[in-house]
Amino acid sequence: MHDKSTKKHNIHFWQGRKVIITGHEGFLGSWLAKTLFYNGAKIIGIDKVVNRPGSVLNDVRKNIISIKGEITNLSLLKGIINRYKPQDIFHVGAEAIVGEALKNPVRGFKTNIEGTWNVLEAARGKKFIECIIVASSDKAYGIKDKLPYREDTSLAGCHPYDVSKSCADLLAYTYFYTYNLPVCVTRCGNIFGPGDLNFSRIIPEAIRSAILGKTLIIRSTGKYTRDYIYIKDIVKGYLLLAENINKLKLSGEAFNFSYENPLSVLELVETIYKLVGKKPKYKIINQAKHEIPHQYLSSQKARRILSWKPAYNLRRALLTTIQWYKEACLEKKI
């Protein structure tokens, strides 16, 4: 049985630890890098693009080692791991946009599947590595009649992005079961917060459209339901998992992180416009293809085993995010 006593995030754990983050310039990666740096970790980041404008990393960038490179380059990853000898690896580098994976599935597969096996293979046999966290997605579960998804729900992605995440999950299990690699998988809903400049995602685009008075284009029917969760609560979950992977013998397991509060796209959009103080202004074009109609996660396992508890609710998280985008608009960053 797992110890169910309360486990708060332990900032002392990270003092002086060497941490590799793939995709450290992306939305999740940049927040992980920034948070871990402030907790005392030494950050080595790998990304195909460095020095992205508008990043939350800008105020700490000079303090991290930033390496430009592709995770599809196995020899590069091996060289970086052998040189820096990290205790922890957060593999969050990926093709994160569902539509891009749909348009170019081979590139999506190479990044999300080959990129994952490269990270795991480069780490295999390295005794100094204590923890590897692989970022998956709720979409790895595929289309299910029974919701919410739980960690023991079968992985059955149907479309390119979804399949790439199902495969990455299975690769993580393979490297744990076969090679005893200390790896865990995280599956989250739609993450949002300050610094997300991917406006193909509904929350950044809805907030920007509301602030600027533009008509928001809703690609789906607006009736699809999703989990939405604030970036800081996700980062908290990642750190708790890394801190406890060995203490609680969690290698080989997966954890969902969710507010357990599914919303339709229209419910979300109307909430955002209300919080911005504007009347909803949108157009439904119903052109979304190959998307899962209804998705949401149970996070009971994370709450029970890790004592993970969100610090934000959806309203507070959206208000904080909206304020960041308002300031970014004023400064013409977006």
Image: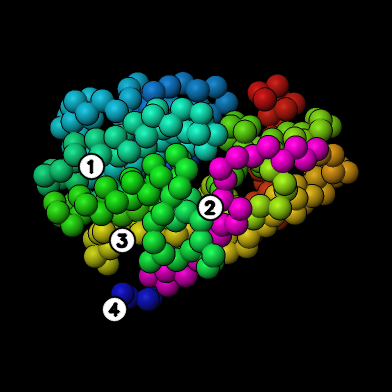
Q: Name which residue type carries label 4.
A: Met
Q: Quadrant of the N terminus?
A: bottom left
- What residue range appears in magenta? 283-305
177 magenta-colored? no
Q: Residue at x 45, y 66 (%)?
A: 150
Position of 42 with respect to 103 (left or right) is: left
Label 1 element class: helix
> Identity of the amino acid at label 3?
Glu
Residue of label 3: 253
- Spatial CA distance of label 1 from label 2 is 24 Å
51 above or below 183?
above
Residue 174: x percent and y percent? 21, 52
User: Mainly helix, strand or loop, the magenta region?
Assistant: loop
Q: CA distance from mark 3 to mark 1?
A: 15 Å
Question: Residue 139: horizontal and vertical position, in percent?
Answer: 48, 50
Residue farthest bottom in this picture: 1
Q: Which mark is residue 1?
A: 4
Amino acid at the residue labelled 1:
Leu
Which one is in front in this view, the residue at disc 4 or the one at disc 2?
Answer: 2
Q: Which residue is mark 1?
A: 120
Question: Label 3's element?
Answer: loop
